[in-house]
Image (spheres, rainbow, N blue to C red):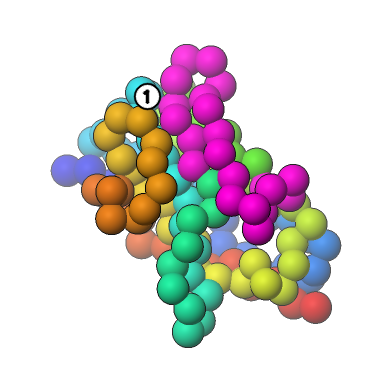
Amino acid sequence: QVQLVESGEGSVQAGGSLRLSCAASGYTLRHNCMAWFRQAPGKQRVGVARIFVNDNGGVPYYYDSVKGRFTISQDNTKNTVYLQMDSLEPEDTAMYYCAAKRGFCLSGEALYTYWGQGTQVTVSS
């Protein structure tokens, strides 16, 4: 049974940082794609970042809204991906989800097979 478990939920002030984790069980992240999505209240879920997990630190991709502020990374020994979020803004407030897709990364949440339960990030001004 595949499980993705997010952690790192928190509330911070604007300009602060948080790190989210997504630990996988029953599923090997290596040579597959892991992505972070977020959904703000009353809005559609959108992509944040994704990474193709390999043996060389991974191949990351960032959406424009977080480029330069967020960093996605992998730890193959822990079968875990991380989302380091710096310079947080109130607009980053959302429920954050990690998701897994077999093979190479592609955009479009419908392509992702496995999803975590979500973890809340709140940024106050």
Percent x, y of residue 110: 28, 55
- Amino acid type, callout 1: Arg
Work out whether 57 lies above or below 60: above
Q: Residue furthest bottom?
A: 42
Q: Quadrant of residue 33?
A: top left
Q: Which residues are magenta?
A: 50-70
Work out whether 63 lies above or below 50: below
Q: Main secondary structure of the magenta part?
A: loop
Residue 84 located left or right of residue 38: right
Q: Residue at (44%, 30%) from the top-left corner?
A: 52
Percent x, y of residue 43: 48, 78
Q: Residue furthest top?
A: 55
Assign the N terminus to one quadrant of the image. top left
Q: Quadrant of residue 66?
A: bottom right
Q: Residue at (56%, 21%) from the top-left corner?
A: 57
Percent x, y of residue 101: 31, 40
